[in-house]
Amino acid sequence: MRRTSAPRRRHGLPGRHPLAIAALLALGAATSAPAAAANVSWLGPNASFWDLASNWGGAVPGPADTALLGAFDTEVRSGIASVQAFSGTGRLRISGGTLRAATASSIGALELTGGALSGKGTVTAATLLWTGGTMGEFDTVNFGGATTVSGLATLSGSGGKGLIYGRTLNLNGGAVWSGAGGITMNDAASIFGTPTPASVINLAAGKTFDDQGNGAAGRAITNGIINNAGTYLRSAGTGSTTIASQFNNTGAVNVAAGTLFLQNGGTQTGSFSTLAGTTLSFNGGAHTLTSTPLANA
C-alpha cells in the first residue's frame, strides 16, 4: 500500500503571503525612521510660551526642526526645548528651563532672566538684557557654543549670571554692567571625561564695557578668560570690582571710580589709567606687561 505524506509547511509567519510580509516590513521601517526636519512657525499669540503646542499650530518644534519666530515675542519658561536652529526679529525671553540651539540662530532681542541658553550653535542677538540665568550647560553634547550681541548688552540686577562650560560671549556693541550680581565663568574642565574649553568674554575694539556697579561687598567676575580689545571703564560707585578671570588687555582700562582688582593674571599690551582717589590693583596671577602705558590723572 502506498503511503502519501502530508504537504510540508514553511517555517516563518504561517499563512502570510510573501507580498504581505514585505508590506509589513516596509511599514515597520517607515514607522521607526526619525522624523524629518521641518520649519515650524510660531502662530501666536504674542508674548506667549514656547511649550504650548497651540502656539505652533499643534506641535512644538523638536531637535531636527528650525523654529521660525517671526516678529513675535516668545518666552521659554520650563523644560528642555531643543531645536536645530531658531530665528526671529522679536524678543526671546528665557525665564526658566533650557533652550538648546544646535546650529547658528538669531533673534532681535535676547532677554535672560533665568534658565539656560545652550547648544553648539552661535546665537546672534541685536541686543541683550541679562539679569539672571546661565549661558552654557553641563552636558557632554551641548557644552560650548557662543552668544554674539551686535548691539548693546545690558547686565543688571542682583541675580548671579553664569557663562559656563566653554560658552563664549562676544560683545560687539559694548555693554553696561550695573547692580550687585556677579558673573561666574569656567576655566577649562571636563564633563564625564569630555574636555571643555574655558568660558570667554570678548569685547570688540572701539566698544566700551561700562562697569557701573556698587555692590556692598564688591562684585566679581570669576574664572574663564576676558579679552578686552575695547575699553573697560569702571565709571561709577565707590565700591570695588574683582576680576578673578584671566584678563588680556589689548585696548584700554580706565578706572574713574572705586577700585578695580585684576586678580588672575593676563597679557597686557594696552593702556591703563586711573583718576585721583581710585585704585587699580594687579593683586593676583602673573601679569605680562609689554610696553603698557600707566597713567594717573
Image (tube, helix red, strand yellow):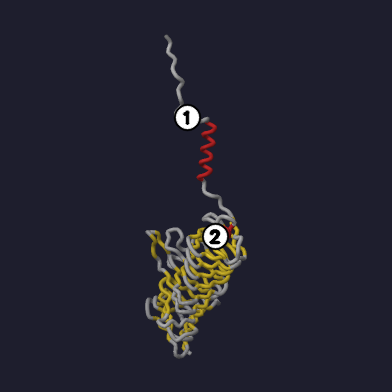
Residue at x 51% of width, y 34% of height: 21
Q: Give the secondary structure at mark 2.
A: loop
For disc 2, the neighbor class at 10 Å (few under 14, some 14 to 19, many from 20) is few
Give residue 223's mark: none
Q: Nearer the viewer, residue 122 or 273?
A: 122
Q: Nearer the viewer, mark 1 or mark 2?
A: 2
Q: Is residue 102 left or right of residue 283?
A: right
Q: Give the secondary structure at mark 1.
A: loop
Residue, disc 2: 52
Q: Quadrant of residue 149?
A: bottom right
- Residue type beneath disc 2: Leu
> Is label 1 in contact with label 2 (beta carbons under 8 Å)?
no
- Residue type beneath disc 1: Pro
Q: Measure the alpha-carbon separation of dots 1 and 2.
A: 47 Å
Q: Quadrant of residue 286?
A: bottom left
Q: Is residue 239 visible?
A: yes
Measured from the top left, where is residue 178 in percent x and y? Answer: 49, 79
Residue, disc 1: 14
In the image, residue 9 sits, relative to residue 124, either above or below, namely above
